[in-house]
Structures are given as C-alpha cells and as structure tokens.
Amino acid sequence: GEFLGNFGTMEAPPCPLLLRAPPPDWKVGTQLILQSFAAPIKKERKIERAGRGYQQWVDKEEYIDFELDEKKQHEERLKRRSANRKKIVLPKSANLDDYYALLGLSATHMTSSEEQIRTAYRKISLTYHPDKAAPEEREEAEQLYKAMQEAYDTLIDPARRRIYDSTRTFDDTIPDEDEGADGEAKPEAFFEIYKPVFARNAWFSKKKPVPVIGDMSTHVADVHEFYDFWLSFQSWREFSHPDEHRMEDAESREERRWMERENRKLVAEQVKKEKKRIRRLVNNAMKVDPRLLRAKRLQKEEKEAKKRAKMEARRKRELERKAAEDADRLAKQKEAEEAERIKQKEKRQRDAAKNTRKQFRRLCRKFKFSKFDIDTVVERLPQSKLEDLYKRMEANSEEAKATFEAETSRIAEEKKRMAVERERELEEKRAKARLKAALEKEAEAKRAIWTDIEVMWLAKAVTRFPSGSHNRWGQIANMVNQMAKV
C-alpha cells in the first residue's frame, strides 16, 4: 500500500500492517486504496527562530489533517496566527515615525548595530506580514508593514540612517553656567548634571570611542584630555532646511553639485549654532568642574608657595648682600683707619727724622764741620744711628768732634769697602761676559765646519728637492736636521 503523511506519498516499509475491514459496498475484484494518517516518529531538532518551519511550530500545525475541509483549515490557521500576533509587545497603535520602535529596537535605540536591525526586521516581518493577517485586519497590517519596510530601508542605509537620527527629537539643552557650581563642596552635583548631557551628545561624534567624563578620582591629565576632545568635537549630525533641494530631482551631475552647494549654504548657519552649543557646553562644564577647580587651587597654592619661597630667598640674599656690604665697609674703614694711622706714624717719623737731621746739622755747624762731611753722615746713617750720634755729641761736647770724625772715618771706610766690592762684582761680570763670548765664538766656529757625513746629507737633500720646489731650502734644512738627530 502507500503511506501518506505530512511529507507526501512515499513507499511503506516492509512491515506487517493491521488493516481494518473493507466497506460494505466493496466488491471482490475491484481496486482498493488504503490510506494511513499515522504520523511519523518525531525526532528532536533545532529550529531557527525565523522561516516557515518556525512559524508552523508556533502555530502548532506540524501535522495537517487532510480530512478537514481546505477552507475551514485555512480559516482556523488564520485565526491562530491572528491570536499569535496579539502576543507581540508592539502595540497596534505604534508611532509610525519611530523607526526603532517599529522594529522592536526601543531598548538599544540608536546604538543598534546593522546585524541587530536585520534580525529584528526578519523576525517582525514574519509576524506582521499582511498575508498572514485576518481579512478584517488586512488594511491595518499593510499600513504597518509598509512603515516597517520604510524603517528598515532607512536604518540599514548608513547615510539615510544618519539623516534620520539627526532629525529625531533630541534634547539640545545644556546646563547653565551656575548649575553645578558648588565645586569641590558638592562634586556629585556636577556629575549628576553634566554626565548625562555629555553621554547624550557623544552619540553624534565621528571619533570613537568617546572619552567618558570620569569622576573625582580621574587624573587631571585625563580630565584635560576629555575636554580637549570636546573642544575639537567633530559631529556627524546633519541638519535639514525647509528650502533644501531634493538631490533626486537633479537631472545632471553639475545640477547635483549645485544643489549640494546650495544645501550646504542653507544648513551652514545651523551647523555653526551646533558648534557654538557644544563649545558653550564645554566652557560651562570647565568653569564648574570640581577637578579643574581643585587643580587650579593646587596650582595656585603651589605658585604662591614658589612665590613665597622666591621672596624668602630674595630677602635672604638681600640680607646676605647687606651683611657683606657692611662687613666690606667695616673692613675698608679699618683699612683706611690703619692706613691713616700708618700714614700719621710715618709722617711723625719723617718729621722726627727731619727735625733730628736739622738739629744734627745745627750741632755740626756749631763745631764747624765741613758741609760735605755733614751731608755724608746724614745721608749714610739710618735714623736710629743718627739720633744716637746726635745724643752722644750733644751729651759730651768735648768728645763730639772725635765722635763725628770717627763716624766720618767709618763711613769713608765703608764707602771704600763698598767700592772695592762693586769693582770686584763688575770684574766678575766682565770675566763671565768674555768667557761667554769665547764659548759662542768657538761654537760658531764648530758650526761653520761641515763634516763629510753632513755634506752627504746636504747632497741628498739637494737632490731630493730640486730647484723650483716649494720652500726648497726650508725643506732641505729640515731634512738635514732630522738626519743629524737620528
């Protein structure tokens, strides 16, 4: 017999079958067709959550009863599918302009990846396809499905998705300058206000990843890096203008370029406002950021400490300079006083010596000594001996002449002795000069005589440096001197 089931007609396996009795109107000799609606043994298998097989599994219709009327069977299937449609979280009255909600991506929203968008579209399109809707819901299903297709086509195209994300309702508000201005007293207020604002605007950044704002434990270098990133923030956000030209209407490449230039002019003002908004956000945050305020305070304290240390060092150097100047002034004053004292002492000594010589001359003239002898004694005798001689002559006038003559004789003998000594020294000098001259003359005579080997050296040098050579005789002399040294 034949085996009929969900999978079509197939040959029955060779096994004994228990058949039911034939119908009463069956006649012997006529053909008998046997049918069996026994289901095959089911095996465990993995089912992907998409496609017809998954839909059948959801509808609990893996095994169709062919004895049912086809129309009734179709109606029951539609009823069950309609009942399953109502199990989807997405409401019938969904906002058709919210493309992420239409695809069931409200959780991930603008952060949804391309793969997530494709999977969500396949999953929802199987459930909400108009062919699977009940007749009374067909019009609503078609409208919803068209919106889903438009959402998918927009979000799967990066350029169209960027335009859509740019035109979505977005919170452009930024905190005022005085918000979160408690500074270091309440740092948590600053992060509660500014952290969600920066996170919200970070979605439009071209550069990824976007640095996070951090917390109070963030290093000040990372804080400056965060604000440097936002000060040079590059946004991919696009703006639209009601008077923009539609690029699809361009009939040529030149017209398309002209439309692009005109559209850029129209949105340039909005782009400029967006940059000012981001810059104002960054400036307001930097003014009240407790980490920057703390860094400025520490920097100011460090600067003031350095300034105080510098002023203290300057004051110390000034005191040392004044002390050095005072010591130098005192030393110079002492030196001047000492010099003045020595000068006065020398003056007194000169005055005393002058007075002594004057009195000695007067005493010598009294005894009628010759002026030559008086000048000789005065010039030759030191001050102390002259005073001693003056005192002896003044104390004993009778022996004054003999004392003066004895001193004169001694001076004369001294002069003779010194003259003889000078003459002897001069003679020694003349003898040395004569000896030196004789030795030089002898050495000159020796130098003037060339030996045979020196003549040979000279001949070699003259041959080596012929006439016309640069500095010929200087090179010849150097060569001969080198040979002589060797």
Image (cartoon, rainbow, N blue to C red):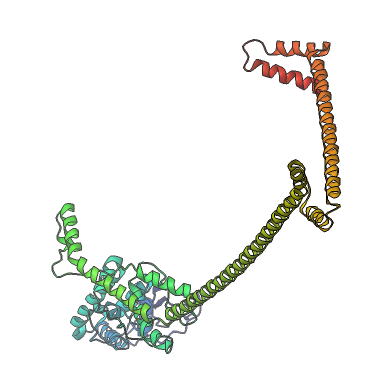
* 326 on left or right of 342: left
* 227 on left or right of 259: right
Q: Position of residue 39 (x, y in %)?
A: 43, 82
Picture quarter with the N terminus: bottom left
Q: Position of residue 486 (x, y in %)?
A: 82, 23
* 131 on left or right of 453: left
Can you say whether 199 is above or below 484 in the image? Answer: below
Q: Quadrant of residue 478?
A: top right
Residue occupying image coordinates x 43% and y 70% = 225
* 413 on left or right of 228: right
Of the pair 271 and 353, the residue shown nearer to us: 353
Of the pair 14 and 201, the residue shown nearer to us: 201
Q: From this viewpoint, is residue 108 visible?
A: no
Q: Position of residue 67 (x, y in %)?
A: 32, 84
Q: Quadrant of residue 38?
A: bottom left
Q: Position of residue 44 (x, y in %)?
A: 49, 80
